[in-house]
Structure formats: C-alpha cells, structure tokens
Image (cartoon, rainbow, N blue to C red):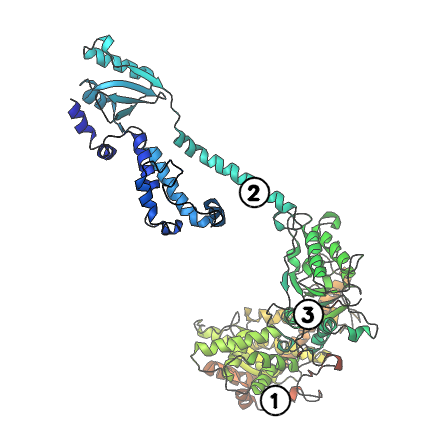
Amino acid sequence: MLSTLRTFARPRNPLVLQRKGLLGLSSRTFNSNVIGEFLRNSKPPKGFEKFFPDASKTPKNGPKQASSNGNSANSGGSGGAPKKPPGSGKEWWRDIYENPQQYMWLGIAAGVGAGWLMLSSGSYSHEINWQEFRTNYLAKGEVEKLVVVNKSFVRVYLKGDPYNSTISFNIGSVENFERHLEEVQKEMGVDSAQWVPVTYSMEFEWMKQLFRLTPTILIIGAFLYFTRRVSNVSRRPGGIFGMDESKAKFYNKETNVKFRFSDVAGCEEAKLEVMEFVNFLKNPQQYHELGARIPKGAILTGPPGTGKTLLAKAVAGESRVPFLSISGSEFLEMFVGVGPARVRDLFSQARKNAPCIIFIDEIDGVGRARGKGGQFGGHDERENTLNQLLVEMDGFTSTTNVVVLAGTNRADVLDPALLRPGRFDRQIILPPPDIKGRLSIFKVHLKPLKTDVNIDTVGRRMAALTPGFTGADIANVCNEAALIAARFLSPKVELKHFEQAIERVIAGLEKKTQVLQPEEKKTVAYHEAGHAVAGWFLEHADPLLKVSIIPRGKGLGYAQYLPKEQYLYTKEQLLDRMCMTLGGRVSEEIFFGRITTGAQDDLSKVTKSAYAQVATFGMNDSIGNVSFEMPRDGEPTFDKPYSEATAQLIDEQVRELIKTAHERTTQLLEAHRDDVEKVAQRLLTQEVLNREDMVELLGPRPFKESTTYEEFVEGTGSDVEDTSLPEGLKGLQDDDSGYDGKPIPT
C-alpha cells in the first residue's frame, strides 16, 4: 500500500525526485547545503562576473590552503584566502553605496532566489476533492491524521510517507466536514477508537496578507512622499508646485538668439527708438555725460503682423544683456495671489541680472484698465497683478537698471497708470509698412529663396501689388510662392509664382472643382463686368489689374485692384469707390431685371462706408461736423452715443447717400452698356482677364493712374527706404562686444 501511494504521488511532486537525489535530506538541511555550496564557490555565477571584480585576483594558494585545512571556514588562522592589508582598497559596503546600480541586479536575483526557497520549503501539498479523499485514501486506510487549517481546508497526512507529502481539500464548514467524516467511518465499520484523528490549526499566510496589504502600503508611502515633497517645495521662493515662479524665458550673452536688427525691415523709425535702449546698455556714458536717463519702458503697439515681437527678438539678439521674455497671460492662474507673486519673481530675477531687459508680449492680457470687465466691484486677480506691475515698474522698490518693453494690439484698453511717463515712457507705433517699407521687407524674405529673378526687381513689383500688407503677410506671400513652385516641381521660384501667391493670400485658393451652372456662371460674369467697367470710367476708382469668374475662397468671382498709397480721402473719392462697389448689383438689374445674393459683401462695404461718412467723418450737411465713435466689428453695442432722433436722421442720410451712389452707377453703366456686354462675353470665354485685355476691349483708361513702383514713389524724395543711422547709433549693428559687466550709473 505504501508503494501504491509513492507511485501516485511521484508524478504530481517533481520536488520529491530532486530531494530523493540529495539522499532524502530535509528541506532545512537542503537549503543550508545549497546556500553554503553557493557561498563557498570561488567562481562567480555566469553573467555576474562584473559584480565580483576581485574574483579573478584570488591568490592561487588560496584554494590549496583551504583544502589543507578542514575547518578553514571557522578558523582565523592561515587557512583560506590571505587577508588584505588595511587601506588596500574600498570596503564592499562602501562600494555598494557609491555604485548602487552595479548591485541592483544582484539584489534582484538574490530576492527571487530567496522567495523561491521560501515558497518551496516545507512539505508538498496536492489538492484533491472530497470524493477522491474518501475513495483513494480514507477507504484504503492510508490516512494518518487530518488537520483542519483556518476552518477552510483540510490537510491530509499519509502513513509511511518518508517525504512528508500532504494532500489537501477544501471544506464548506467544519460541522459538515465532521459529520460526513463520522458517517463515512461508520459505514466502513471502523471502531470509534481507531477513527482518524482530527486537529485544528490557525496559520497565518504571510504571502497572501503581504499581497493584500501592498496597495495600502504603496498609497501610504506615496502620500508621505508627496507630503514631504510639498512641504519642502513650499519653503522655496516658488511656492507650492512652483506656481509663484515666473514663467519668463531667460536669454543672455551665451544664448544663441539668431535675430538681429538687420533682420527687421519696414519699421525704421520704431527700430531706431528701440536701438536707443540697446545703445544705452552698451554705451551708458554717452548719455550720462549729457545728464540723460534711460527710459524705464516702451510699448510697441500696432496692428497684428507689423513686427512687434520680431523687434523684441532683435533686441534680445543684439543687446547681449540678460533678456527676460514672458506673455501677459502667463501671469494669471486660477489660484489667488499667483499673478502678483509671478510679477515679483520676474522683477526679482531682472534685478539680480541687472542691467536687464524685460519683454511682456500681449500686455493687454494683464494691463487692461481697472474697473472694466472685472468681477463685481472691479477688484479681481487681474487687477491685483496689474497693481503689482505698476509698483514694480515705478515704486519704492523700482530700479533704473531694468528696462521693460511690451507689445500689444490694443493700446486703447490699457490702464492710464501703465502708460504714464515713468513707467512706459515711450509708445512706439508700428503701422503697416508703406511701399518703400514693403520693398525692404521683401528683400529680407527673398534672400533665402532659390530664384533667378533680380531681388530688387521682383521686390519692387511685389511691393506695388501688396498695398496694406504687413510684414507677416509679406513673409506669407514669399513662403506661398516657394510652395507653389515646389507644387509644380519648378527648379526655381519665378515671378509668376509670386503673383499667384498674392492672389492666394488675397482671394483664397482657386476652386477648379467647383462647377457653376451655366446660368450662374453668366450672372457672375455680368456681375464682375459691372465692377470692372464702373471702375474703369470713374476717376477716383482704383486701377484694375485682373478680373476672374473662377471661384476663389468664399466668392464666386474675383477682381484685383491696385490702390495707391493714400491717407486722406475726399468726399468725391469715397463716392466713386461706393459706385464701383455697386457696379455688380446694378449690372444684374440692367441685364437680367433681377438681383441675386451675390452682392451681399458689396452692400456691406457700401453700408460701412456710408455710415463712416455720415456719422464719423462729418461729410453730411444734415448731421453736421460731428463725429460719433462707432463700435468695432464684434464688439457688443448696448446704446448709441447719440439720441434716437439723431440715430433716425443718420439712418435716413445713409439711405439717401447709398441711393445717390446707386443712381449714379446706373447712369454710368447704361451709358456703357455695350462695354459691359463685351467684357462679360470675354469672361465667359476666357474666365480670366488681365489689364491688357481690358485695354483691348475698352481702350485706355481716360484718367491718369499709377501702376508701377516708380510711379508710386515719384515725388517722395527717394525710391527706397531711408535706413541710415544717427551718429550716436552708428556701428551698433557691427558691435559684438556686448555688455562688459560693469554697473550702470544711475
């Protein structure tokens, strides 16, 4: 029966064979022998040689001495390896502290081995069910004793098992188990004195408990770690999580800022004023000898894309003094007090690195006038930040060695206290460049392009075709030209690519896939022909360059004009522009006897022009010489700055003015009905007409007009922008010496 049990347990217990090969040693003896043999082995395990640097340096007589002395492991005499003299090398525990990564994998391997030994120690247990226990073991009398562990399972010990193997099975409840065991033994006819003894045991399963407590331990440890970290961070100047720290980017002499003043064009007057700040930091004695002091700040203001931020980048690259750059929105957070703290930290950094320049981009995000758009009472976090900024710029703690530059598109909404002398002493306005400035900007952006055309020639042509363009628009045109050339695999960028890029920027992408119905196409042709003919025979209308009925952007047709550089407009000039704009609607009325929705954009422009003439420019006799400020596009209007009677009168005069322009346009196109017909038919055939086609159809325009760069700049004194520097600023762009580190006298 014992042999039967061994045969049954042998395939289910692989450790039995291993232990049998070790002469049946107990688990404790087995573990001690294995660990001892591993520790006595002088050769390190494969893959762990680098963790035992002294293994190869063991003296040759070490093993011989060890073998000659039987108890060398316990003796302190000559047996074993010779001792190292004191101070001959690092101790092993010091090496662990100094090079922890080298011992990391050794520790992992040791931990895995120890875990395996602990899990494998003890007797082997095979899990069965109640029926197997009853049939194969209890009925055959092989059960020595039963141990109920933790009231959940029963451990079965077999008779005559030298390997101490056990079998286990789960139970539902102790009472049911006892009742079933008693019934089975009675059925077997076993005397009650010979019943299998049953004992009860409560064991602590430390591995399961450890796994169960691991998430709790990790959560508590993480909580303690972050609590300690937050407490340490809160003691620093930046506050909790560094929220009080300024987000400004720091540039100094070693920082490679590529922009220079030579990269900025089209705003020479603004550039000269900014260059004075740089020159003061480089050559302070030049100003102090005359008793002058450096302005504390300057605001760069102008429409988007005119070069405010680019000019600040040039200051950072040219000044060679510490430069701090930050956005106005970076001061504000959802937490109270963060904005003022960041302002203090910003100026603290600037004073430590003085002389220093601070640039605040989009300062209207933090510098809006107090009491406008705030919370109830007008006292919110933004106002606290603004108050701190005012104090830092010109307060008891202010310093003359920190210069503040700022950029904004909305100087009209800034707080008056921010704009007063002593804080921002200068307001540097950057308007859209004139034709000479556009030429200078084109020369800057044409240099990196691969082209055969003369840069000066194409620059003059493009400057004449882009009235009202800002520096950002010009940079976009040059980039679009290069993209168009690459789209058609052109080896170089040609003049036609620049002209196509201008059309792309002004009117949008050409929609060749948008097919118009024949009736719609005819309507668009006569609509555009009405615009072209009306502008051709009106003295103050802009010269026509191109007209097309190919859909572009949101429009079904497109007409390109060449407005001249003009800053003052007369009443007659504005009326001619209104008539030219109404030419499309009038042409539809004349040739089709109906109107369409295609004139919506034209009517919007005419309405705005009429309201401006009547209510803003004082060009109406009934309203008189008054000017009412009209709301901007997108701004909410709650009330008008005039009475209801005046509003009604303004509306009547606007309608009358538009009616007059409409009647005048109708008379003009009726007189040139045949010309409109010729232009419309040619458009239906060619789809695109240029200036030469218009001259062929209508003859030369009966009014003098300017279409070339030379004609536009005639009478202005020079055909290029004046880029000469004053005597005090000459050599500034070529001076790379930078700030010498000496304190600037105040």
User: Based on the displayed image, in which of its 4 quarters is residue 412 positioned?
Assistant: bottom right
Q: Is residue 362 visible?
A: yes
The residue wearing badge 1 is 701
Classed neighbour count for the residue bearing mark 2: other residues with Cα under 10 Å, few (<14), some (14–19), many (≥20): few
User: Based on the displayed image, in which of its 4 quarters is residue 107 positioned?
Assistant: top left
Question: Looking at the picture, how far across and down is residue 687, in whole percent?
Answer: 48, 80
Frontmost residue, 191 versus 404: 191
Query: What separation in Å lies between label 1 and label 2 (alpha carbons)?
Result: 80 Å
Question: Which circle's residue, 2 or 3, is located before the other in the chain?
Answer: 2
Left or right: 279 in relation to 159: right
Question: Looking at the picture, how far across and down is residue 403, in whole percent?
Answer: 73, 65
Disc 2 residue type?
Phe
| Of the two numbered discs 1 and 2 in the rendering, the one whose residue sits closer to the viewer | 2
Q: Residue at the spot x=35%, y=38% of the render?
A: 72
The residue wearing badge 3 is 302
Residue 449's disc number = none
Left or right: 225 in relation to 427: left
Residue 226's disc number = 2
Query: What separation in Å lies between label 2 and label 3 (alpha carbons)?
Result: 47 Å
Disc 1 residue type?
Arg
